[in-house]
Image: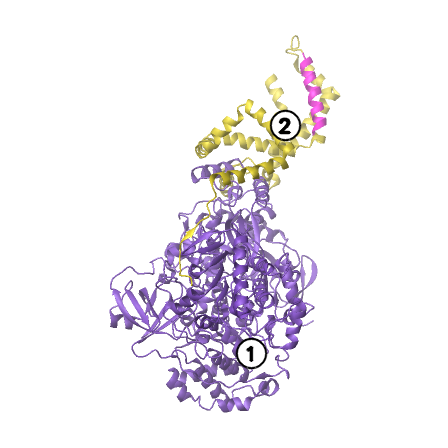
């Protein structure tokens, strides 16, 4: 049979697949050998030698031995067993066994388990201390004495996360893991993604949240701990008893350590992991190999950014405004007031005098009940969510061309693409885990990466080609590349003929986009554009990734459309490893819109104006529904100013700061007759509310999110809601019932069942099918069949064909010559948005205490700016005050102001109300300002310990060859052979 | 028309309200666990009579200091050896095969009875004839056979099963084994060493003869 190999394993004939290793086959066939350096997500590292087996009579490392047809594996031969014992014994020389008082003794310590499985009773190689101290920062620690030098952490850092901070210094007498060129952890380039502590097989690299907390005896002070370890070692009469005792202790821990699966809320990648908790204390976040979007990966926020959940600043009671102050109140009183005020407005101005804004951070179920409250209970389509601020243009571009507003495939498709083009996306910082997949594919598998950005971001640093177009001109160069490829005959005519409409009209529309024109407008050279076209032409598969750098412009929808057009004409749809990938910013940007929190669409993007669809919902909800589309976020603000909107119910959104033209928005909120804000914190926006309702964050509720891959994932409740706070869906249900809605959802699963019964796109979604780490990518058929590859046979248009959609360039906003500097803006890796959550994480705040303005070296020299100089930026709409960092990440008159501030540094005091012409998404990226120096000298806002000041050391993996080349190293198989030959000789 | 404000007046329940709330919680817990509480109080009364609470209170309050002293003391004293011996003792008991040992114990008991009944007086200097006479006694012959079997078992290598030898000592042995002549090997790797065992057994049996001379 092709693709299969016939092999023998311990005398038994079995089939193996090509490319499988001996270890793979043994694992599949329940034949266990120790394998301490091997991790399924990392592959063979070959440092520990414990997996030695006999293949065709030769002792080899099973983790790296690819099988051939007819191979004979013996894992139980005497010599292989002896070699395994020698290898394990060497490991024990590097790791002190004090399991019972070890925080890692939770049943999953791989050294403990190997010693137990191999029935080791004593070790021949004595454990000796290494001459290095324990090193730690706020997030994790490294204990050299416990480190077995397996190199998993290094492999993960170098080749999975690709931050390239960790190496093992094999040249030392006692090798150890080092950071950069042997810096302390705190001063290194480490981004604290947590990969190292996740993959460590023991307690060497461990989350500090676990230290002294996980075990019953591990909290003992060091003064007592060392004698206790000595005693344990002295009295132990063999490891059997030690293993038994520690296993008993590990079992006891099950009683007090909860492990709950949740989904991260810091970006659209959708990382899922187990959270280990003891009472309300988070011990650690433990990603799992089976997590569909992230596997073992996390970023610093997902791994370590959860202190906010137990913050003392959490709202625990409803607040009611009385004059110029709030007072705490009980829920009933708050509900009474809301009921009265909503009714008053309805009677006075009708239901359209009210509006509802839901959150892209909340669950699908939260969003669904919010739009149902708006439509079915109050009777208005004035409902929207904050994806309006970011990704609506991308969705529009895809609706126009391919019919569905979602990523064409999965993150694994991006991983396997031959070419990845990233435009207007700071992927490395905004979608860190997704970025690791691109970086790894490029580093190890030859994937080509092209980056187009104003700023030399992390991905640009690594790109094969990096281009810097003028701000807001991406449509021009993308269209020019498209035209050039068609002119060269490099497009995919057969794909176009079979699957795409309107090719000729589109081709005609491209006439103005010559390379010369594009060069003039975008600043990209003809050669650069031809190089991009050539790369696309030569690549079998191309994925195009984009984000806010594309969408947050006056022509954001059009540029998104142009990107999709390019992918269509080059045939980069309908196949794995290709397609368009608008990277969703928040954890549930996709889901908030998917579930109908839009003024013109029901769940599943069906129009509210479609009579058949509306009739279905009217029947399902038992009410008559409004027939006209409502107001979006942007229109709501205008309507408030115009006096047409008087009551607003906003949840989970810092609208006063994150909406553009903050001064204009805040003055609108001031004009409201009645303003309800539902949040976990007393946010800047809440300061303007009449009623503030305390909600529960993701750790305190159940529900689902949809990530950037259109993937549904379940989150389970980690903690009880803090104080009197409640999950959003429950609050909304209780409010709805004040208006006679009579909703009786017992849990969010029942809400999902209702959605599935009404919305064809999610017909097969149910909590049963999303158990644990199971997931579904929409559309989901009633039988549960999901759609990892969005377009397989056809596009969702009546004739099954995609549509090329001609677009014109919209020049970016010109604020006048006076405002001579362009202020680019976006995210930082370690902070989330305005910072309401991440500034409450002391470890993060210590390394990145405040927002800062990036200034180019050229501009700094011209204006006399240096690190720490305090400047004021002024635009026609407001001003900010912020300290500077001089860096070549930006060039010329480009500035970069991260969005992570709610005070004087908040970017949206500069932005305007100018918006994408098709979706009203604010053109955040089209802002110019003038700069004045307030204080020349000051402390750098970027502390020395920030990872940006580190010094990474790239290499492939752990460089095990250096270990093998050491004089004191002999392959255990050779040791056994030598013994045998001595014995026989 | 609401101006932004950061002023929040917290709802501070009065002391009396908090107390009342706590009491209600306690009351319901007490009522739910009536019987358990009655039993617990009885047990606690007994513990109090024995000064257990005072002792434990002192121990807990000074926990870190006590633990450190205790651990350091144990670590630095022979107590670890006692603990180790105890643990080993358990291990040894587990290794004993009582079915096989029973006949040996019965024989030992009989032998001890014989010794108890034996009177030295008047038998000193009995000479070889008395000894040879004893050697004709079938029980003596059987006794020597049993003793020889015991010696055989005694000579078998058990090093792999030993738990008492420290790791360092093992290392020492291992390194010494590599240098011939520094130490007699404990490994019966060749048949050459078996005659030592036989010789040792014979010597042991011969001891009475020598001393008698």
Q: Is residue A428 visible?
A: yes
Residue highlighted by disc 2: B202
- Nearest the eye: A213 or B14: B14
Residue A945: give x, y in percent of width and height: 36, 57
Q: Residue furthest top?
A: B122
The purple one among the chains is A
Residue A454: give x, y in percent of width and height: 39, 75
- Residue B116 is inside the magenta segment: yes
Write down the colour of chain B.
yellow
Q: Chain of mark 2?
A: B
Asked where in the image residue A615 lies, by quadrant, the reply is bottom right
- Nearest the eye: A889 or A161: A889
Q: Name the disc covering residue A399, or none.
A: 1
**Residue A931 sits above or below residue A492 on the image:** above
Q: Is residue A763 visible?
A: no
- Nearest the eye: A834 or A571: A834
Q: Residue furthest right?
A: B138
- Residue A957 is inside the magenta segment: no
Residue A546: give x, y in percent of width and height: 48, 74
**Residue A513 sits above or below residue A42 on the image:** below
**Residue A681 sits above or below residue A873 on the image:** above
Residue bounds of the magenta highlight: B101-118
């Amino acid at each position: 049979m092709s693709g299969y190999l016939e092999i023998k394993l311990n005398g038994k004939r079995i089939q193996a697949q090509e490319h499988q290793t001996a270890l793979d086959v043994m694992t599949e066939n329940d034949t266990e050998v120790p394998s301490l350096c091997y991790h399924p997500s990392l592959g063979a590292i070959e440092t520990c030698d414990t997996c030695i087996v006999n293949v065709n009579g030769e002792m080899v490392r099973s983790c790296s031995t690819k099988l051939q047809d007819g191979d004979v594996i013996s894992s139980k031969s005497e010599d292989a067993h002896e070699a395994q014992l020698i290898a394990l014994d060497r490991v024990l020389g590097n790791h002190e066994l004090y399991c019972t008082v070890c925080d890692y003794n939770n049943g999953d310590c791989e050294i403990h388990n190997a010693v137990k499985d191999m029935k080791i009773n004593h070790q021949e190689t004595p454990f000796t201390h290494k001459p290095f101290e324990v090193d730690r920062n706020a997030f994790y620690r490294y204990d050299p004495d416990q480190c077995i030098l397996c190199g998993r952490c290094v492999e993960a850092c170098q080749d999975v996360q690709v931050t390239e901070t960790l190496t093992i210094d094999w040249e030392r007498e006692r090798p150890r893991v080092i950071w950069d060129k042997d810096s302390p952890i705190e001063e290194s380039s480490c981004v604290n993604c947590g990969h190292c502590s996740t993959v460590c097989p023991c307690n060497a690299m461990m989350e500090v949240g676990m230290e002294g907390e996980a075990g019953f005896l591990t909290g003992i002070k060091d003064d007592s701990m060392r004698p206790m370890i000595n005693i344990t070692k002295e009295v132990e009469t063999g490891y059997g008893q030690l293993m038994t005792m520690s296993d008993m202790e590990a079992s006891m821990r099950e009683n007090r350590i909860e492990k709950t699966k949740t989904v991260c809320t810091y970006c659209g990648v959708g990382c899922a992991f187990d959270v280990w908790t003891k009472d309300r204390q988070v011990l650690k976040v433990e990603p799992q190999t089976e997590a569909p979007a992230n596997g073992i990966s996390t970023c610093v926020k997902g791994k370590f950014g959860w202190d906010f959940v137990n913050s003392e600043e959490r709202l625990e009671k409803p607040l009611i405004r009385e004059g110029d102050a709030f007072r705490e109140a009980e829920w009933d009183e708050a509900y009474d007031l809301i009921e009265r005020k909503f009714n008053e407005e309805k009677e006075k101005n009708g239901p359209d005098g009210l509006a509802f804004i839901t959150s892209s951070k909340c669950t699908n179920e939260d969003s669904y009940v919010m739009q149902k409250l708006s439509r079915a209970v109050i009777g208005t389509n004035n409902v929207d969510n904050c994806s309006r601020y970011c990704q609506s243009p991308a969705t529009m571009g895809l609706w126009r061309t391919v019919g569905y507003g979602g990523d064409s495939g999965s993150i694994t498709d991006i991983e396997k693409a031959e070419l990845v083009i990233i435009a207007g996306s700071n992927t490395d910082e905004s979608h860190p885990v997704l970025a690791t997949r691109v970086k790894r594919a490029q580093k190890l598998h030859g994937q080509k990466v092209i980056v187009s950005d104003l700023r030399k971001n992390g991905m640009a640093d690594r790109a094969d080609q990096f281009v810097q177009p003028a701000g807001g001109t991406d449509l021009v160069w993308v269209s020019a590349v498209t035209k050039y490829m068609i002119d060269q005959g490099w497009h995919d005519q057969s794909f176009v003929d079979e699957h795409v409409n309107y090719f000729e009209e589109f081709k005609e529309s491209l006439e103005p986009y010559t390379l010369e024109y594009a060069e003039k407008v975008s600043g990209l050279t003809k050669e650069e554009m031809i190089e991009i076209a050539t790369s696309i032409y030569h690549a079998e598969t191309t994925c195009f990734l984009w984000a806010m750098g594309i969408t947050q412009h006056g022509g954001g929808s059009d540029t998104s459309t142009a990107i999709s057009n390019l992918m269509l004409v080059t045939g980069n749809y309908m196949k794995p490893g290709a397609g368009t990938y608008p990277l969703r910013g928040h954890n549930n940007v996709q889901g908030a819109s998917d579930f109908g929190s839009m003024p013109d669409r029901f769940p599943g993007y069906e129009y509210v104006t479609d009579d058949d669809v509306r009739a279905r919902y009217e029947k399902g909800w038992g009410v008559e529904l409004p027939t006209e589309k409502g107001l979006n976020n942007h229109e709501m603000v205008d309507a408030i100013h115009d006096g047409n909107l008087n009551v607003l119910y906003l949840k989970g959104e810092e609208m006063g700061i994150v909406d553009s033209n903050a001064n204009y928005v805040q003055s609108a909120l001031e004009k409201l007759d009645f303003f309800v804000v539902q949040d976990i914190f007393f946010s800047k926006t809440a300061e303007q509310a009449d009623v503030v309702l305390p909600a529960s964050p993701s750790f305190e509720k159940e529900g689902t999110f949809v990530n950037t891959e259109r993937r549904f994932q379940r989150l389970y409740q980690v903690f009880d809601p803090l104080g009197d706070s409640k999950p959003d869906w429950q609050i909304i249900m209780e409010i709805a019932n004040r208006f006679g809605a009579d909703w009786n959802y017992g849990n969010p699963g029942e809400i999902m069942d209702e959605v599935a019964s009404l919305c064809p796109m999610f017909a097969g979604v149910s909590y049963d099918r999303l158990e644990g780490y199971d997931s579904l990518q929409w559309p989901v058929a009633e039988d549960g069949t999901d759609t990892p590859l969005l377009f397989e046979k056809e596009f969702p248009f009546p004739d099954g064909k995609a549509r090329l959609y001609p677009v014109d360039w919209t020049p970016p906003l010109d604020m006048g010559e006076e405002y001579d500097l362009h202020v680019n803006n976006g995210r930082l890796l370690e902070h989330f948005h305005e910072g309401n959550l991440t500034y409450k994480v002391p470890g993060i705040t210590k390394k990145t205490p405040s927002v800062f303005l990036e200034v180019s070296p050229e501009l700094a020299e011209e204006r006399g700016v240096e690190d720490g100089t305090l400047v004021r930026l002024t635009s026609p709409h407001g001003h900010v005050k912020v300290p500077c960092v001089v860096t070549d990440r930006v060039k010329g008159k480009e500035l970069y102001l991260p969005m992570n501030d709610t005070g004087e540094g908040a970017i949206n005091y500069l932005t305007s109300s100018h918006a994408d012409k098709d979706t009203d998404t604010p053109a955040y990226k089209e802002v110019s300002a003038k700069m004045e120096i307030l204080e020349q000298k000051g402390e750098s806002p970027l502390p020395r310990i920030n990872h940006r000041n580190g010094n990474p050391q790239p290499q492939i993996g752990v460089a095990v060859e250096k270990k093998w080349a050491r004089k004191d190293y002999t392959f255990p198989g050779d040791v056994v052979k030598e013994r045998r030959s001595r014995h026989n000789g | 028309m609401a101006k932004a404000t950061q002023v929040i007046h917290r709802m501070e329940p009065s002391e009396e309200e908090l107390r009342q709330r706590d009491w209600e919680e306690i009351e319901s817990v007490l009522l739910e666990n009536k019987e358990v509480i009655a039993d617990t109080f009885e047990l606690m009364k007994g513990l109090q009579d024995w000064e257990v609470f005072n002792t434990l209170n002192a121990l807990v309050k000074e926990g870190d200091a006590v633990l450190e002293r205790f651990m350091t003391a144990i670590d630095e004293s022979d107590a670890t050896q006692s603990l180790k011996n105890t643990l080993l003792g358990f291990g040894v008991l587990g290794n004993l095969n009582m079915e096989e040992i029973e006949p040996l114990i019965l024989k030992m008991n009989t032998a001890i009875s014989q010794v108890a009944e034996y009177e030295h007086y008047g038998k000193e200097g009995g000479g070889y004839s008395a000894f040879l006479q004893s050697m004709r006694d079938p029980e003596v012959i059987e006794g020597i056979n049993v003793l020889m079997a015991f010696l055989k078992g005694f000579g078998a290598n058990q090093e792999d099963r030993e738990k008492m030898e420290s790791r360092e000592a093992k290392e020492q042995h291992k390194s010494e084994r590599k240098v011939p002549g520094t130490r007699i090997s404990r490994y019966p790797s060749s048949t050459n060493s078996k005659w030592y065992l036989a010789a040792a057994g014979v010597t042991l049996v011969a001891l009475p003869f020598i001393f008698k001379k």
